[in-house]
Amino acid sequence: MTRDLRILVVEADPEKAQNIIDALSEAGWQVVHAIAQVSGLERSIKEHDPDIVLIDMENPDRDTLEHISAVSDTKSRTVAMFVDQTDHDLTQAAMAAGVSAYVVDGLQMNRIKPVLETAIARFQVMRKMRSELDAAKQALEDRKTIDRAKGILMRQRGMSEDAAYKLLRKTAMDQGRRVIDVAHALVTAADLLT
Amino acid sequence: MSHQVLNCGYVPLVDCAPLIIAKELGFAAEEGLDLNLVRQPSWSALRDMLALGHLDAAQMLSPMPVAMSLGMGGLTAQIDCLMILSVNGTVFGASNALAAELGPLRFGDARAILTALGARGPVRIGVPFPYSMHRLLLSYWTATQPDLNAEIVTVPPTRMADAVSQGHVDAFWVGEPWGSAIVQRGVGKILMAGRDVWAFAPEKVLAARHEWVAQNPQATRKLMRAIYHAAKWLDADSNRPLAIEILGRSEHLNLAHEVIDPAVTGYLTPAPGARPLQINNFLIFHAYAAQFPWRSQAAWIAAQLGARDADIKTAMQCFRSDLYRDNLGPLGAELPGASERIEGAMHEATEVPGSRGPMILARDAFFDGTTFDFTQKSDQ
């Protein structure tokens, strides 16, 4: 298969950009460039003359890319958002993974598809890693708050750690709230009183 | 009782207020809807999410349903405009450097600003999206000045102040709060409001897929009723301080009170340290039948997008004045006698006959006095 496409990745986070470039290079595409800011996008497009532009769906700069593709002059090649009306699953998968592709007019489907599939796979991995990281961070934060709440009860009421946790849990159950919410309320109240 | 969940996309700007009020003040819940507001990072992302069925409804720039239905730009899909969410509410301004070159200009004098710009040489002007009322008004306005060499570029509103301060654009046409944010940062000046070019421009609309609307008549009716009540509440002067409070606290907007204030009160500060100016009809949610989707508004948009006569007729059908009459008439909404009018014909607020007695329509003149009569293009 010919993998001589020129690919441009628009991504502000350098680590993420490198990650996508690596995935594409490993799969055999060699001419992959990344830019961080869309403000110079028109120039970058002229310079790199990409066949495919990949951008994160969350990136507000997408609207700028949209405009450039809508009004590009006849000298440069038109780049339009890639939507495959025949392959609904691919379009949905790209959306779920959070990646949009803009492709040069007339590029064949069998050349676009593997690029997009590779990008989708990498975006999925990155998204999963991010949500796992967020979940881990949140769990750690929650544990700290609950520990502080337990500490307050242990000091103020002379309870054991176990009894303090049981009281938090009972209060949460009685009020139909989560333990973390009760702990938060207690910590906030204690901060106000000291 | 469990409420029907309805996913509605929006972009965090002051004029998405009817959606936030419908949710926060319980107008949606009263209709039995659990309105789930889904924030979108860009207009293109919102468009894709709506077109591919990830959203049931969305706040859109008024030209978007027309452009999508006519197959222009990106994704083609049959999208209906159920009602107008807001009229006016945008501003045009210049960087400090350009404003200094243009010299003193009376605020809102669209002709004088244009003449001054024409004498200046090439200008780069930022708009939020190619299919926006901002861009259409800008193109309409600048087309009347052949000397003006204007390059229009798209800059996301959240990045507009940076683009102005870095000299990436010389001028900007943007919705609030981002115009006031530019003034507050001290990098530019507001020279006029959108209403100085067209006094009654449909700005944001409530949109849904045509197919979804046909399949969900009850949900459509409930959503329209909730938004109708929310906009009516928003337009009462006595509710404005509370509205600013609710919008400022809302997680959906995440904007400071002081940048929400100008759009909602209509008192705009045009330059750093300047006295606030009261701008009449700066942003309208409900008054003057503002929510009524005139088919002639769709026709004007289509014509500005360069559509042919046949396509203008198609565009007129996506502004669903028929649904507005059916769903909101029973609530006592003011209904004009016809669904098309001559756009730009009102040089002052005028009393006209409506379906239930006289009603007042606001001034809707264009800065150059042109009128647009699309009535012969419709079948009615």
Image (cartoon, coloured by chain):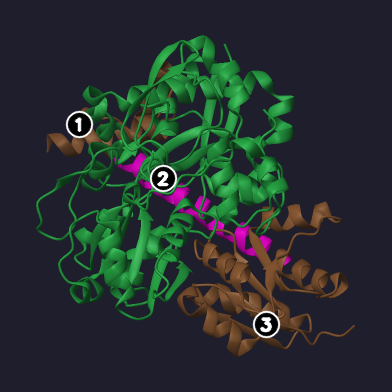
Chain colours: A brown, B green
Disc 2 residue type (three-letter)? Arg
Residue B303 image point, x, y percent: 59, 51
Main SS of the magenta part reads helix
Disc 1 to disc 3, C-alpha distance: 66 Å
Circle 2 SS class = helix
Residue at x-position 49% and y-position 28%: B292
| Callout in the foreground (2, 3) | 3
Disc 1 to disc 2, C-alpha distance: 20 Å
Disc 1 residue type (three-letter)? Gln
Callout 2 crowding tier (Cα within 10 Å): few <14, some 14–19, many ≥20:
some
Of the 4 image quadrants, the one containing the N terminus of chain A is bottom right
Disc 1 marks which residue?
A: A156
Residue B231 image point, x, y percent: 39, 27
Foreground pick, B73 / A109:
B73
Whether labels 2 and 3 share one chain: yes
Disc 3 residue type (three-letter)? Pro
Q: Are the two marked residues, 1 and 2, in contact with CB atoms closer than 8 angstroms?
A: no
Residue at x-position 62% and y-position 23%: B322
Disc 2 marks which residue?
A: A143
Q: Which residues are magenta?
A: A121-150
Q: Earlier in the sequence, mark 1 or mark 3?
A: 3
